[in-house]
Image (cartoon, rainbow, N blue to C red):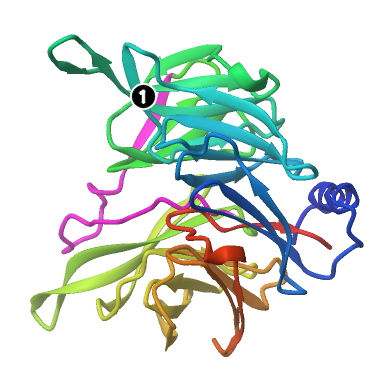
Amino acid sequence: MPSPRRRLAAALLLLALGAPALAGDLILTGAKPDKLYVIDAAKRTVLHEYRIPGANGLVGSLVPSPDGKRVYAVINRMESIVGVDLATGATVFRADLSTPTERVKDFFALTVTPDGRELIAYEVPTRLKPSEYEVEQPRFAVFRTDAGLKAQPVRVYPAQRRMHMLLMRPSGKSFYALGFELYEYDVKTGRLLGTRGIQHWEMPGHSQPDLLAFWPVTEPTGVFTSPVYAEAPQDGKPTPTTALMSLDVATGALDYRDFEPMSALIFSTVLSPDRRSAYGVYSTLTKIDVPGRKLAGRVPLDHTFYSVNVATDGREIYMGGAMCDVGFYDAATLEKKAILKLPGCADQALASLRVLAAH
């Protein structure tokens, strides 16, 4: 269940948006070339369509602020980060990462501290020399979120290569960086606090796994989940198998659970509020019995969806990405309840689908 603080923040957001209190959720999604959408999940309607100046064809990796008043996004071919006021659509924060002598990409990885005062971005820089490109050390850059439209980092520290997601711990003292392995860093100093296996997981009999984790969804449980693929022994021979990885960002508990031989690709997953079911999407909608470690249901979709989320009351599944549809499905039966087409059929591509509680 959402905390009283998050409920209050969501209620204040609704008042700021000029809307009555809702019995459902607000869904946030981005779309090409420069759109941010605020959706009333209960009414299946777009509350607001905002344009982000200088998005340059990309609005991805949406990260809401802790108070629910802003959302941060990677834009401009992964070379800029913006913060958008959800009440007005105004760009209130912007960090342009590249310079004339250095091209800097943020490969979808950013997070915000629990007090909302700092934003951490994962930067992959390349020095632009007259006759060559020089690959530089990846780094984390820390920005003040009140720095305005020409934000510069207040701290920079080195990072491992091949990151694609950052997840802030609720204490605000450290954050997780997800890549080929799971790293934990100190927010203030950048010190590496620990490393745990993803590609070097401890799963007896399993091959080195693979995963595609670009969607930093932890709501409503505070647990990040992702499908993981590997070969595992079955009937005496290696068999392609799908597992569910889960990371509780508060406790640090990391878990892997096989649930079926690989029969369908799943791009992203989300955990139900009761933590008993997980849902995954790609060309099908999949329901996973988490305690039972087994497939609980699967239905075909109209087309591929990349990003999935769940209602804060656990009753509906929301899905987006890939095209201009936002889908609404029953969490118990997997029955399709509604499809919302975004205005102008704007392509969501890899944008995260985020949910703000509106109770």
Q: Give the quarter of the image for residue 295.
A: bottom left
- Magenta span of residues: 191-218
Q: Residue furthest left?
A: 237
Horizontal side of residue 148 vs 359, given as left or right: left
Q: Residue 289 in the image: x percent, y percent? A: 47, 79
Q: Give the quarter of the image for residue 226.
A: bottom left
Is 196 a magenta residue? Answer: yes
Q: Residue 324 in the image: x percent, y percent? A: 51, 67
**Residue nearest the observer in this picture, 137 or 259:** 137
Horizontal side of residue 307 vs 243, given as left or right: right
Considering only vertical position in the picture, is 213 above or below 335? above
Considering only vertical position in the picture, is 237 above or below 155? below
Asked whether residue 251 is in view, the answer is no
| Quadrant housing the C terminus | bottom right
Is 239 a magenta residue? Answer: no
Considering only vertical position in the picture, is 33 above or below 358? above
Q: Residue 195 in the image: x percent, y percent? A: 34, 35
> Overall secondary structure of the magenta stretch?
loop
Q: Secondary structure at mark 1?
A: strand
| Quadrant housing the N terminus | bottom right
Q: Residue at x 26, y 51 (%)?
A: 201
Q: Residue at x 74, y 45 (%)?
A: 86
Q: Residue at x 47, y 62 (%)?
A: 321
The residue beneath circle 1 is: 104
Give the total of numbered labels. Answer: 1
Asked whether residue 188 is in view, the answer is yes
Kind of residue at disc 1: Val
